[in-house]
Image (spheres, rainbow, N blue to C red):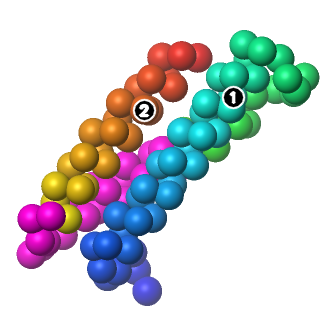
């Protein structure tokens, strides 16, 4: 089954889960870079964080591009896109 065939609530839920996981991993990477809890490279963790945030952004955009979407799902998708874009830019500029 393609992701474009899934219902909007499922896509929005997956977008939220990908986004929150990406934000948590990015925050852990930033905290470890400044407080040095673990002496390990944070590059792979940053990469996974960016990948998850981009996946969340793409999934929310997929909801907006579908035809005949209810207005409440469109608003939720717009809010998710805004939050994910701000989070992605924050973690990009914090490197």
Q: Does residue 26 lie above or below 9 as drawn?
A: above
Q: Quadrant of residue 12?
A: bottom left
Element class at badge 2: helix
Residue positioned 60% across, 40% down in the render:
24
Left or right position of 89 against 60: right
Residue 6 x/y as whole percent:
34, 80
> How many numbered marks are there?
2
Q: Quadrant of residue 46?
A: top right
Quadrant where the C terminus sits is top right
Which residue is label 2 attached to? 87
C-alpha separation, residue under disc 1 versus residue under disc 2: 14 Å
Residue 47 can be seen, yes or no: no
Is 55 included in the stretch rendered in magenta?
yes
Q: Main secondary structure of the magenta part?
A: helix
Residue positioned 35% across, 30% down in the render:
86
Residue 67 x/y as whole percent:
12, 73
Q: Quadrant of residue 63?
A: bottom left
Is 53 included in the stretch rendered in magenta?
yes
Which residue is label 1 attached to? 29
Residue 34 x/y as whole percent:
72, 13
- The crowding category of the residue bearing disc 1, from other C-alpha atoms within 10 Å (few below 14, some 14 to 19, many at least 20), is many
Quadrant where the N terminus sits is bottom left
Residues drawn in magenta: 52-72
Residue positioned 44% across, 32% down in the render:
88
């Amino acid at each position: 089954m393609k992701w474009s065939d899934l219902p909007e609530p499922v896509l929005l839920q997956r977008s939220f889960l990908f986004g929150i996981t990406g934000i948590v991993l990015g925050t852990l990477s930033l905290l470890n870079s400044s407080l040095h809890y673990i002496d390990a490279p944070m590059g792979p963790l940053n990469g996974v964080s960016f990948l998850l945030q981009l996946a969340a952004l793409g999934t929310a955009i997929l909801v907006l591009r579908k035809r005949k979407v209810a207005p409440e799902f469109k608003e939720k998708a717009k809010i998710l896109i805004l939050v994910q874009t701000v989070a992605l830019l924050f973690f990009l500029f914090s490197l």
